[in-house]
Image (cartoon, helix red, strand yellow):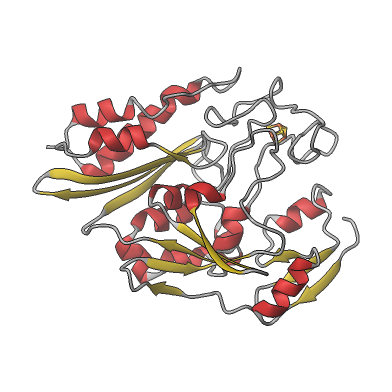
Amino acid sequence: MHPFAYTRVSDTREALGAGRRGGRYIAGGTTLVDLMRETVERPETLVDISGLPLREVTATERGGLRIGALVRMAEAAAHPKVRALYPVISQALELSASAQLRNMATIGGNIMQRTRCTYFRDVTADCNKREPGSGCAALHGHNRSHAILGASDHCVATHPSDVAVAFAALEATVHLLGPDGERRVPFAGFLLRPGSTPNREQALQTGELIQAVEIPAHPRPLKSGYLKVRDRQSYEFALTSAAVALHLRGGVIREARVAAGGVGTVPWKLPAVEKHLVGERPSEALWAAAAAKAADGARPLQHNRFKVDLLSRTVERQLRIVGGTR
Ligand code: SF4
């Protein structure tokens, strides 16, 4: 581990000042400390923000929910409002990491976590994300776990977060605070596809701090859930996953929100699937026809062709679980 300075801040003004001077924010530290140990990350200064007042889950005036950036994964998963209104969020969190990690890691840190591409963590391998311009060892290496959607010639790594898939499905907004004040970024624009700059992963400006993630109001009742397909039953990242939320009235699907994980360089919203569902009545045939559109535009690599079919089957199964059939 490279030497670094450590400072703990107690208010946001102090945090922003340290962030503006190039300090790296740290809270749970469950990703960053690992990467520092492996010398993938070499921050000169860590700014500990875990004492900031960003640990509340609150209902918004608009009928949605605001989850503070420093709420622990386990706290968010167990929160009565989250469980009641958005089970898809609770389930995505509970299927992530391990109990110990969920007790430490925060919501803000979760959406900021970096890829689990093994070449990214191997400092002897070529990796444009870690070292821009060095190449991408995964393109012609072992790429079974990599992306089939949203990749570029510069990077094919997936985003590892589960709850980010639920946030993408529910069209959340990220609340940021920076030297120029507050701003809100739609979740769809917060995590960036790699393009030619895979080292740039979020739409954050220097010194900006995540304050909260806001879930907008959706028509109620909203049935929702998260399905994760992986090589083993716990403590494993998704090969594919599906976050589904449906609002039915009079036996007809009035609203559909669907996103996939484990397949994209960012959590992958599925508008073609959503469009196919709205205005229809649940049926086995509907789930199959909608899910058949899930992998539209996929460009698999040598070792992950299986994900194309697996993605459609994951989405179909989760539509059936959430929407039922008649
Ligand atoms: Fe690096 Fe991305 Fe290639 Fe993995 S896929 S080696 S993270 S550039």
The picture quadrant where one finds residue 323 is: top left
Tell me which residue sits at (32%, 29%) in the image. Answer: 291
| Nearer to me, 156 or 188 | 188
Q: Is residue 148 above or below residue 106?
A: above
| Nearer to me, 221 or 314 | 221
Tell me which residue sits at (50%, 37%) in the image. Answer: 230
Instruction: Tell which quarter ligand 1 is in.
Output: top right
Which residue is farthest right? 3
In the rendered image, the quadrant that contains the C terminus is top left
Q: How many marks?
A: 0
Is residue 210 at least partly visible in the picture? yes
**Rendering coords of residue 305 (x, y %):** 52, 19
**Rendering coords of residue 267 (x, y %):** 50, 42
| Nearer to me, 325 or 210 | 210
In the rendered image, the quadrant that contains the N terminus is bottom right
Q: Is residue 94 above or below residue 71?
A: above
Which residue is farthest bottom? 10
Q: Is residue 37 left or right of residue 241?
A: right
Q: Is residue 81 left or right of residue 249?
A: right
Which residue is farthest top? 302
Q: Is residue 215 above or below residue 141?
A: below
Which residue is farthest front? 180
Is residue 162 at least partly visible in the picture? no
**Rendering coords of residue 200 (x, y %):** 69, 45
**Rendering coords of residue 186 (x, y %):** 48, 54
Q: Is residue 150 left or right of residue 8?
A: left
